[in-house]
Structures are given as structure tokens and as C-alpha cells.
Image (tube, grey):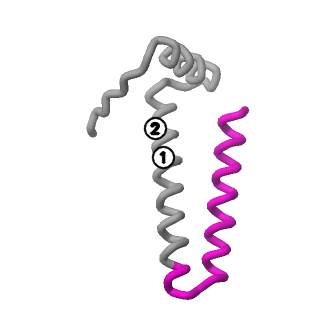
Amino acid sequence: MKTIPYRCDESRHKALLGAAKSSGTSVQRLFDNFVTHVLTEQQLEARFAARKARGNPERGRELLAEFRRRLSKGAAQVNV
């Protein structure tokens, strides 16, 4: 396990604490969820590009639809 320091000003720190508290989680878990979301997005884009390069547009469209569903689902969870 590695530690990644994150520096921010006082107002952003308070906002992070508030977001974590309102979602019933820790700031650590909040960051972990964010990183997981970003990495998943990147992997889906890479898979889409690979399928596109191989010339399978139908599978590419399926992956793009999955990517969009995951994005909207993640946005809905953040807004709840």
C-alpha cells in the first residue's frame, strides 16, 4: 500500500470533510471511490479504442453504452 499526499486549502478541506460526512464515509474512502471511478473510466475508454481498432463497431458501441451507464450511475450516487 502506498500513501499519496494531497494538499489543499482550508476551504477545500472543509468541503471534503463535509462531503465525506454527508455520504457516511471517510475522506480516505471518498478519494478511493474517486480514483476507482477515474481508473474504470480510463480502462473502458482503452477497451473501446481497442475494439474500434479491431473493427468491431457493434462491440465498441456496447462498451460505450456501458461506459455511459457507469458514468451516470456514479454521478447519481454522488448527487444522492
Q: CA distance from mark 1 to mark 2?
A: 6 Å
The amino acid type, in three-letter code, at marker 2 is Asp
Residue 52, label in figure: none
Which residue sits at x=64%, y=67%? 64
Q: Residue 52: x, y in percent?
A: 55, 80
Neighbours of disc 1 within 10 Å: few (<14), some (14-19), many (20+) = few
Q: Residue 62: x, y in percent?
A: 66, 73
Q: Is the magenta region chiefly helix, strand or loop?
A: helix
Seen in the picture, residue 53 relative to 9 is either above or below; the reply is: below
**Closest to the observer, 36 or 60:** 60
Which residue sits at x=56%, y=18%? 15
Which residue sits at x=27%, y=39%? 1
Which residue sits at x=69%, y=66%? 65
Q: Are marks 1 and 2 in contact (CB under 8 Å)?
A: yes
Seen in the picture, residue 67 relative to 12 is either above or below; the reply is: below
Residue of label 1: 36
Residue of label 2: 32
Q: Is residue 70 magenta?
A: yes
Q: Secondary structure at mark 2?
A: helix
* Magenta-drawn segment: 51-80
The amino acid type, in three-letter code, at marker 1 is Thr
Q: Residue 70: x, y in percent?
A: 64, 54
Quadrant position of residue 18 = top right
Neighbours of disc 2 within 10 Å: few (<14), some (14-19), many (20+) = few
Q: With 49 as the anchor, is 69 left or right in this view?
A: right
Quadrant position of residue 58 = bottom right
Q: With 37 as the anchor, is 57 left or right in this view?
A: right
Q: Residue furthest bottom?
A: 55
Image quarter where the C terminus lies is top right
Q: Residue 22: x, y in percent?
A: 64, 21
